[in-house]
Amino acid sequence: MRSSRRGFALVIGVLIFSAILGGIYGPSVKATAAGANDLQDSVRDFTQVLSVVQQNYAVPVDTDHAIYEGAIPGMLRVLDPHSSFFDPRQYALLREDQRGKYYGVGMTIGPRGDRKVVTIVLAPMVGTPAFRAGLRPGDVILKVDDKPTDGLSTSDVADMLKGPKGTSVKITIGREGYEAPLDFTVTRAEIPKRSVDVAFLLRPGIGYIKLSGFNETTESEMADALKELNASSLDGIVLDLRGNPGGLLNEAVAVSDMFLDKNQLIVSHHGRASQERRYYAVQGNQGMTTPLVVLINGGSASASEIVTGSIQDHDRGLVVGEQSFGKGLVQTVSGLSENTGLALTTARYYTPSGRLIQRDYKDVSLYDYLYNHKAPPPTEVKLTDGGRQVTGGGGITPDVVVAEPKLNDFQQLLLRHNVFYPYQGSVGGFTTFFLGSKPDITKSFVVDDAVMTDFRKYLDRLQIKYTDADITQNGDWIKRMVKEEVFTSVFGLTEGYEVELQDDPQVLAGIEALPQARALYENVRKVIAQRGGESPTQ
């Protein structure tokens, strides 16, 4: 009964919280009063339904589950795809992501296997306790503090690895090439959840920055990356926002500020009858006029679309890649009782030219909206500062469209069997298999004929059928995949990522587009100067 009352009280809290926001943003006192009467009726109906379910359902009802997983998410789902409820664990993880840090050992873990699922190390983060202790991709986590991980989810194992700073945790792992399990005692530390994954020179004079999210440390991380690259002296910068789902609005504004001219509009937002709020570049690029290319794809959403939209609308740089996701809704995240949280859509945001990036979600299923979306026809056409046409209503359309290459049947077969990765089914993946023989790996490592012979033996071991033509026609791709995973395992994520980017067609297209980005920016600065220093989007 106590659990039931707690869940019911939370539903009422969510309803009242939503009603309060409705009062804040509502058009009139009369409408708000009517809404209060409707709320009372809705609460009464909900109470009656819950009572009938509790008394008459065929089996005992877990009320908390019905409310947390059903009633509240169901209510929010009919509003829009992005308003959502967070249970205590989800809310804690959300705050962890927003803060950009946690306390643990510093490694990414995940499930692997078919019949028997185990938790493995995907990658230790360079410089963290796990990395310094010698844990490596492919290690199977057998025990944590002598407690077996059999039957535990990856989330359960992750929780066991986290703990107060300075405390120790014993991790027992199984590793290819070693008959007995290995024990590692690791001291927990503050682990940054970095939003800037990597920043390095793709080639002389061309900087590359991979930004994976927007949390409370993004502004400082980006500033450090630009300083480390000596951005003002470069011939070009490739800012990679592919797969970036967004995050904190103020951090997106701060990143845009670093590239735009002072006082240029970055984004605006307003909700139902609410006052418009406009965000401008406060510091500006401070003379850093390096040509810029922004990479996006279907996984680029929300805050990453704010950055991309501001760059594109002001002709500050060129956008390369594929259509972005199309999320133009602003969520206000608030803590509720019982350590839960609510993200409620309270406004829509607009790019400097006035584009609404949000695509239609009312005429598609939630699954299709999230995972199977297609670029809809534009609902509006606007102009950039330099007079180019840009569209809204369906994400951001790149200036240079470059599709991600499609995998052929043999490549899909190898990936489906997780051949390259640290753990495959019930045996180690090729990287673990190869490193299990303890070869001496340096950064001059190349995948030569001897390694390819080992690769063929590994495919034979897994009874994966192939022909000589399969290996020959896909040789370059196989060699890159092997080298990438070996470098990730031995040297860390950054080195593995550098290998991956060497043949990335979208990155290569971004480099080729830098002279065009330079010409675009130089032209718009002349146009704005002729207008007396005012851009049409200010």
Image: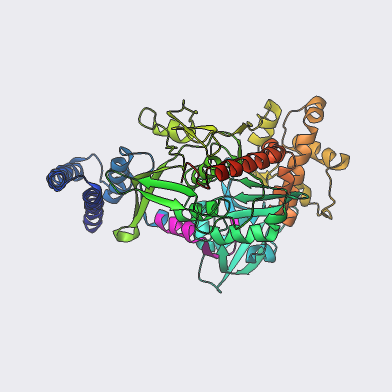
Q: Is residue 105 magenta?
A: yes
Q: Nearer the viewer, residue 480 or 234?
A: 234
Can the viewer see residue 152 in this picture?
no
Asked if 91 appears above or below 353 in the picture, the reply is: below
Can the viewer see residue 291 in this picture?
yes
Q: Nearer the viewer, residue 272 or 216?
A: 272
Looking at the rendering, which quadrant does residue 186 occupy? bottom right
Q: Position of residue 431 (x, y in %)?
A: 74, 47
Q: Residue at x 75, y 35 (%)?
A: 477
Point out the residue furthest to the bottom here.
166
Chain part drawn in magenta: 91-108
Relative to 267, 41 lies left or right: left
Asked if 212 appears above or below 360 in the picture, the reply is: below
Q: Is residue 339 magenta?
A: no
Quadrant holding the N terminus? bottom left
Q: Position of residue 427 (x, y in %)?
A: 68, 45
Q: Position of residue 408 (x, y in %)?
A: 69, 27
Q: Position of residue 238 (x, y in %)?
A: 66, 46
Q: Residue at x 68, y 55 (%)?
A: 231
